[in-house]
Amino acid sequence: MRRSFDRGDTAEREEFLIEACWLMRDRFTSNELWGAIGLPEKECMAWVEQSEGMRLFRTRLFSRIVPIVRDIGMWSANVQAAFEKMGLLEFCDPNLDVDRLLASDEKVAEEFDAQAHVTQAIHAAE
């Protein structure tokens, strides 16, 4: 039996989604660290925001999340506006094959696990 949700439920889900995406987007900026160790916060944050590592992290993460949000029907004007503020609308390509991306991610994870297993076996044999 499919449950129908009222507007309050949808608004709560959107709020949760938006907050979670902000947290994931800013996960590794270390903004609380720079001032604490005596470095100029604004300059450090600008460097982090423009770094290749941050670009790759966000691309990898949100190229999966944004199309799924659209596909599950949470692509409201409110969510789109928040994603625009976060700079994530570039990941809304309707031609993106999310299933293929996720399958590729799974293959990479399996290869990583297999390599870790071999490494553990080698260390155990030593």
Image: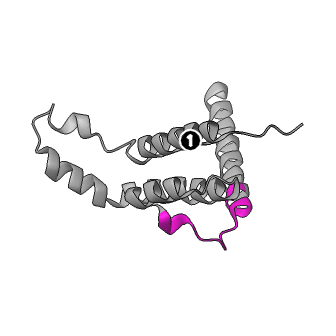
Q: Indicate the quadrant containing the C terminus: top left, top right, bottom left or bottom right.
A: top right
Farthest bottom residue in view: 95
- Nearest the viewer among 108 and 56 is 56
Q: Is residue 125 above or below residue 49?
A: above
The local crowd at label 1, few if under 14, some if 14 to 19, many if 20 or more residues have their Cα within 10 Å, is some
Query: What is the span of residues highlighted in magenta in the rendered image?
Result: 89-102
Residue 53: horizontal and vertical position, in percent?
38, 56
Q: Which three-letter amino acid code belongs to the residue tagged 1?
A: Ala
Q: Is residue 120 magenta?
A: no
Counting from the top left corner in percent of width and height, residue 84 is at 43, 61
Residue 5 location (% of width, % of height): 71, 39
* SS for callout 1: helix
* Residue 54 percent coordinates (x, y): 38, 54
For the point 44% across and 54% down, which residue is it? 82
Which residue is nearer to you in this view: 96 or 2? 2
Residues 52 and 11: in front is: 11
| Among the 4 quarters of the image, the one containing residue 94 | bottom right
Seen in the image, is 41 located left or right of residue 17?
left
Position of residue 105 relative to residue 23, above or below, is below
Q: Residue placed at 80% from the left, 37% from the top?
A: 3
**Residue bearing the label numbered 1:** 11
| Residue at the image point whose x is 70% and y is 67% from the top | 97
Seen at 50% across and 40% down, the residue is: 15
Q: Where the N terminus falls, by quadrant?
A: top right
- Give yes or no for residue 94 being in the magenta stretch: yes
Most extreme residue toward the right is: 1
From the viewer's perspective, tell me whether residue 76 is left or right of residue 72: left
